[in-house]
Amino acid sequence: MGTKFVSSTLIVLLTAMLHQSSGCSCIENPGFCMSDFAIRGTILGVQGNATLQEDLVYSVQVKEVYRNSSNSIEVNGTIDIKTGGHTCGVHGLEEDSTYLISGLYDTSYSIDSCNSVVVEYDDPDDINDLGLPCSASLTTVTPYVIIVGALLHFILR
């Protein structure tokens, strides 16, 4: 009876571990505008092989910037966005296709299925549910406040 109990317990534990490792479990997917970066961009190339569970690097030409916490994304510039080769990675983005992409920034740009929003962009109606345009952050508002303040100071002198 003891061996049967140990075998049953082992099977339950192995099943639970396989279930945990075979899927991606997310607490909550962030909003597009709440990510570290949010862009509209066209995939220029892909490095890596998702079939072999290698990490992928998408080379993306930036068409529009909605959020830029790194302050290093420029329209018409190119950025590399990494994603894991595991089940939480974002796979299947096609070259020459345009996407709305948001994700994380910590010395490099990255996306995954828990912390990113990736939507193919065919026409402006694709962005209706994403809350665009993103509300201005302090980094985008501050230069305008300074300029307007300087102009008002100059005019009111």
Image (tube, rainbow, N blue to C red):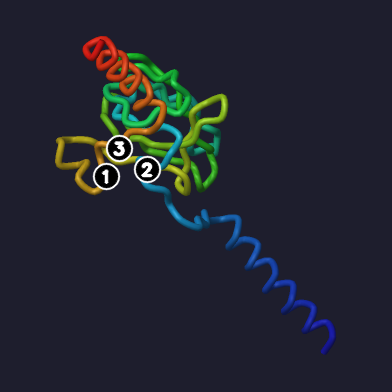
Numbered circles on residues, count: 3
Residue, x 32% and y 26% (percent of image)? 65
Residue, x 38% and y 16% (percent of image)? 78
- Percent x, y for residue 103? 44, 37
What is the secondary structure assignment of the residue under circle 1?
A: loop
Along the polypeptide, which appears first: circle 2 or circle 3? 2
| Label 3, residues with CA under 10 Å away: few <14, some 14-19, many ≥20 | some
Whether label 1 touches label 3, CB < 8 Å:
yes
What is the secondary structure assignment of the residue under circle 3?
A: loop
Q: Quadrant of residue 72?
A: top left
Location of residue 27 with respect to 39 vertically, above or below: below
Q: Amino acid at mark 3?
A: Cys
Residue, x 41% and y 32% (percent of image)? 37
Q: Which residue is mark 2?
A: 117
Q: Amino acid at mark 1?
A: Gly
In the displayed image of the protein, which residue is found farthest to the right?
2
Location of residue 44 with respect to 55 vertically, above or below: above
- Percent x, y for residue 35? 43, 39
- Percent x, y for residue 92? 37, 38
Q: CA distance from mark 2 to mark 3?
A: 14 Å
Q: CA distance from mark 1 to mark 2?
A: 12 Å
Q: Quadrant of residue 157?
A: top left
Q: Nearer the viewer, residue 152 or 47?
A: 152
Identify the disc placed on residue 131: 1
Q: CA distance from mark 1 to mark 3?
A: 6 Å
| Label 2, residues with CA under 10 Å away: few <14, some 14-19, many ≥20 | many
Location of residue 110 with respect to 11 vertically, above or below: above
Q: Nearer the viewer, residue 8 or 116?
A: 116
Residue 41 shown left or right of residue 124 in the figure: right
Along the polypeptide, which appears first: circle 1 or circle 2? 2
Residue 84 shown left or right of residue 9 in the figure: left
Identify the disc placed on residue 134: 3
